[in-house]
Amino acid sequence: MSKRDFYEVLGCQRQADEASLKSAYRKLAMQFHPDRNPGNSEAEAKFKEVNEAYDTLKDPQKRAAYDRFGHAAFENGGGRNGFNGGFGPEFTSSMSDIFEDIFGDFMGGGRGRQGGASRLRGSDLRYNLEITLEESFLGQTVEIDVPTLVSCTTCDGSGAKPGTGTHTCRQCGGHGKVRAAQGFFTIERTCPVCQGRGEMMDEPCTDCGGQGRRQQNRKLAVDIPSGIEDGTRIRLANEGEAGIRGGPPGDLYIFVSIKPHDLFHRDGADLYARVPIAMTTAALGGEFEVPTLDGARAKVKVAPGTQPGQRVRLKGKGMPVLRSKETGDLYVQLDIETPQNLSKRQRELLEEFVRLTTEETNPTSDGFFHKLKRMFEA
C-alpha cells in the first residue's frame, strides 16, 4: 500500500510555514493519540502516519529532500521514517516539540542542564531611596547599604568544600531534569535534588552550607541624575542576589521617591509656590524675593491692582529636564491676605477709603452687584 502525501496527511499546503505544520500536527496527534482511542487500530495507524509526516516536514533538510524526491528520498535507508512499532524516538522527537510549545514558558523553557541551570539565577532586589527636592534638582552620588546574598569567598561560589569534587546526581542521572507521566503527556521538570545541575557535591562548603553564597551588607554608590522625578526606577544590572552555586546574579532596582517640600510643589519640570502678600502690596504694587533650589534668590514683582490667585512666572527657575539642557519654570501664586485685628485708626482709614471708592476702584465686584440688582428688579 502506497503512502499518502505527507502534506495531505497533515492537511497543509506545500508552502505552509513551520508554525502551521506544528499547529496541524498538534491537533491531529491529540485527536488520534492511543490514550484517547484505546483499542482502535485505525486511530493508532493514523497516529503513526501523522507522526511520521511531521517528523519529516519539521526538519528543513528532510523537507527539502521530500519536496524534491517524495517518499523515495527515504527509501533503502535514506533516512529515518516510520513509527518503529511503538512510542519510539520519532514520536519522542515530535511530541517534545509540542510539549515545549505548550509548557515551555510555564516550566522555565529549555532542555537538559542548560534549562535547569538558568533558574539558579539570583533574585532581583528592590531598594527604596528617598531624596529631597534639592537633591533631585542638583543630582548627586549617594551611598546605599544593601543587605543581600553575595558569592561565598571560601568556595568561590561553587558551594563545594575546597579540595573536594562532584558526582553525578542519582535522581536524574546527570540530566538535570526528571519526568513524570500525567495522562498521555510526560511532564518534564527540574530535578529537585541537584536543582538542574546534573551533579552533586561530595562535601558542601562549611561557610555557606553548599549554597555558594552568604548574607552580607553591600555598600553601593548610586548616581542620581539631575532632574530625576518621583517614582523613577533605576536598574543596577548584576547587583542583586548572587546565584546559587555560581549562578548569575540578579539585578538591583532602586525606586526613588522625593520628600514633600515646604515651599515648592513640582509638576514635571515646573515648580509652583504660593506666597501670601499684604492687601496694600496687591493694591499699590511692590516686590519681594523667593529662594530658588540652586541656593540663590529670585525677585518677584507685584503689579498694582494684582488680584487673588494671579501667578507670576519666573522663566528658567524650575527643575532641570532629565538628560537635557532644558529647564522648567517657577510659578509664584499670589494669595492676598485680608487685614485682621485692626486698630481704631486703621478701621477709620479703611472706612474713609470705602467712602472714596468708585466703580473704577472695584470694577469687577461693582459690575457683578449691578447685574444682581437688575435681576432682582426684573
Image (spheres, rainbow, N blue to C red):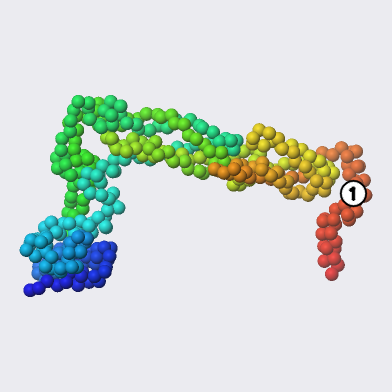
In the image, 206: left or right of 239?
A: left
Residue 40 appearing in the image = no
Q: Position of residue 43 (x, y in %)?
A: 13, 69
Q: Name the image quarter holding residue 75.
A: bottom left
Determine whether 142 is above or below 228 in the image.
above
Q: Name the image quarter holding residue 30.
A: bottom left
Closest to the observer: 133 or 354? Answer: 133
Closest to the observer: 166 or 106? Answer: 166
Q: Name the image quarter holding residue 139.
A: top right
Residue 320 appearing in the image = yes
Residue under label 1, please give it: 354
Q: Position of residue 306 (x, y in %)?
A: 79, 48
Determine whether 121 is above or below 83 in the image.
above
Residue shown at 82%/48% (left/top)?
305
Q: Quadrant of the N terminus?
A: bottom left
Q: Position of residue 33 (x, y in %)?
A: 16, 65
Residue shown at 14%/72% (left/top)?
4
Q: For mark 1, give the secondary structure.
A: helix
Q: Tag count in the figure? A: 1
In the image, 1: left or right of 187?
A: left
Q: Position of residue 273 (x, y in %)?
A: 68, 42
In the image, 117: left or right of 76?
A: right
Amino acid type, label 1: Val
- Answer few, some or many: residues within 10 Å of disc 1's Cα (few below 14, many 20 plus, some between 14 and 19): few
Determine whether 359 is above or below 215 in the image.
below
Q: Quadrant of the C terminus?
A: bottom right
Question: What residue occupies the far bottom of the structure in this picture?
Answer: 1
Residue shown at 64%/42% (left/top)?
318
